[in-house]
Image: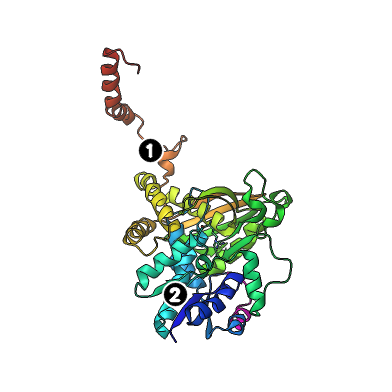
């Protein structure tokens, strides 16, 4: 019997998929759950997959890989899709798919399967990664293929002894990893209504946040955060700690209308406390350490980078090339930024760096000013020359200037 490696989340869809793939494709199913920072009972998850009929079930801890190979790069590129969404789901999918492919290659499987619907971005991200890393493998997308409604799926599960969550099921669809938590479906699908309170789990209501601001100082080395308040931390611990701290100040709520790759606009809620702090701090440190031209040019590539990550184009030459540019710029991004957290606000309030391009003797208006103001006259004469000539010609032709 041939084997299919399934990306397993433990939810109803992928649980039903274990049985469905076995029966409809006549394949052995190996379930792979990848830990990218969602805190859950992975042993229980493994047992569940086996009890449903998986031939094997594995849990891969990919938290450090997620930080080192994805989150860090996203930070270098100040990644915010449509200026708001840190794209944490989009960043995790190529890693989940990569881990799945590694297992498939190891055991000589011929099929790969995921539990995405046919309406979302995630199917694209999984399958684009499969195409790049394991083009020889065949792909099964059960949820897209089986054409069952939710109720039919629950009937199917009950018929086959697949556990259906009995406790009051969350009215939302949730995806969680180190870099954020997404909340979709249910009441959220009406964009004209404010987000329901019970959608939020990582962030307190800013109105109920502490009356005293919180401060935290992040130290960066080559664009990567390495210390929090002077304590050296690995990336995963640092992000987890910031999720707690910033979340307790109500920082990191995102509420947006998003353009999906598949052409749909969707209403999205996200909670991204650590990402909000680190992106704010990182961008601030860049303002201190990058020269003006790089600082102005980089956002063009950031925009493209955000788009291609969101579109599932991680394993592509363009992503690698833009990454190389980002990495080059980060050599100078060393130093410390102090962030103030206050009732949902996150602000960089102080920064310092050995690589700072800020020069007091050039900036000051006090004694010690080394900027020779007399030079500005000649500079402006030449700088303004094109504007002066164009305006003169326009005026000669009666055009408005
Ligand atoms: N809209 C976001 C994205 O496309 C979040 C998707 C959440 N995915 C999920 N399977 N719940 O990246």
| Lateral position of residue 28 relative to residue 15, left or right | left
Provide the residue designation for mark 2. 112
Quarter of the image for residue 167 reads bottom right
Q: In this view, does 229 lie above or below 377?
A: below
Most foreground residue, 247 or 51: 51
| Lateral position of residue 311 relative to residue 245, left or right | left
Q: In this view, does 55 lie above or below 149?
A: below
Q: In the picture, which quadrant includes the N terminus?
A: bottom left
Residue 317 on image: x %, y %: 31, 61
Of labels 1 and 2, the one closer to you:
2
| Element class at badge 2 | strand
Residue 277 on image: x %, y %: 56, 55
Residue at position x 51%, y 54% in the image: 279
Q: Does the magenta stretch include residue 46?
A: yes
Residue 47 on image: x %, y %: 61, 83
Q: Give the range drawn in magenta.
A: 38-47
Q: Main secondary structure of the magenta part?
A: helix
| Element class at badge 1 | loop
Most foreground residue, 23 or 188: 23
Most foreground residue, 376 or 64: 64
Provide the residue designation for mark 1. 370
- Tell me which numbered mark, 1 or 2, is placed earlier along the sequence: 2
Q: Distance between the residues labelled 1 and 2?
A: 65 Å
| Lateral position of residue 342 relative to residue 325, left or right | right
- Can residue 334 be seen? no
């Amino acid at each position: 019997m041939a084997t299919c490696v399934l990306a397993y989340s433990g939810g109803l869809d992928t649980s039903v998929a274990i049985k469905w793939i076995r029966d409809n494709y006549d394949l052995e199913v190996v379930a792979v759950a990848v830990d990218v920072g969602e805190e859950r009972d992975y042993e229980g998850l493994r047992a569940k997959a086996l009890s449903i009929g998986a031939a094997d079930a594995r849990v891969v801890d990919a938290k450090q890989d997620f930080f080192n190979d994805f989150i860090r790069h996203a930070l270098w590129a100040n990644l915010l899709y449509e200026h708001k969404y840190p794209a944490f789901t989009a960043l995790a999918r190529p890693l989940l798919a990569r881990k799945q492919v590694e297992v498939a290659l190891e055991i000589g499987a011929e099929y790969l399967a995921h539990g995405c619907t046919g309406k979302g971005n995630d199917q694209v991200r999984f399958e684009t990664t499969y195409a790049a890393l394991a083009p020889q493998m065949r792909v099964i997308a059960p949820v897209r293929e089986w054409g069952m409604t939710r109720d039919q799926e629950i009937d199917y599960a009950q018929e086959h002894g697949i556990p259906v969550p009995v406790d009051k099921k969350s009215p939302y669809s949730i995806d969680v990893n180190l870099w954020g938590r997404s909340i979709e479906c249910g009441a959220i699908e009406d964009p004209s209504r404010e987000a329901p309170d019970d959608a939020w789990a990582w962030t307190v209501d800013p109105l109920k946040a502490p009356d005293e601001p919180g401060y935290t100082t992040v130290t960066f080395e080559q664009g990567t955060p390495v210390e929090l308040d002077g304590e050296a931390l690995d990336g995963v611990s640092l992000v987890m700690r910031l999720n707690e701290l910033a979340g307790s100040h109500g920082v990191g709520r995102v509420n947006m209308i998003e353009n999906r790759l598949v052409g749909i606009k969707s209403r999205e809620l996200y909670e991204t406390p650590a990402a909000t702090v680190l992106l704010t701090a990182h961008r601030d440190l860049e303002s201190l350490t990058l020269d003006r031209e790089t600082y102005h040019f980089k956002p063009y590539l950031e925009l493209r980078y955000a788009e291609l990550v969101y579109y599932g184009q991680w394993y592509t030459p363009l992503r690698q090339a833009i990454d190389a540019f980002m990495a080059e710029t980060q050599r100078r991004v060393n130093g410390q930024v102090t962030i103030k957290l206050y009732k949902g606000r996150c602000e960089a309030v102080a920064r310092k760096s050995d690589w700072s391009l800020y020069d007091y003797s050039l900036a000051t208006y006090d004694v010690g000013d080394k900027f020779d103001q007399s030079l500005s006259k000649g500079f402006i004469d030449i700088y303004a020359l094109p504007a002066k000539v164009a305006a003169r010609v326009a005026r000669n032709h009666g055009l408005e200037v």
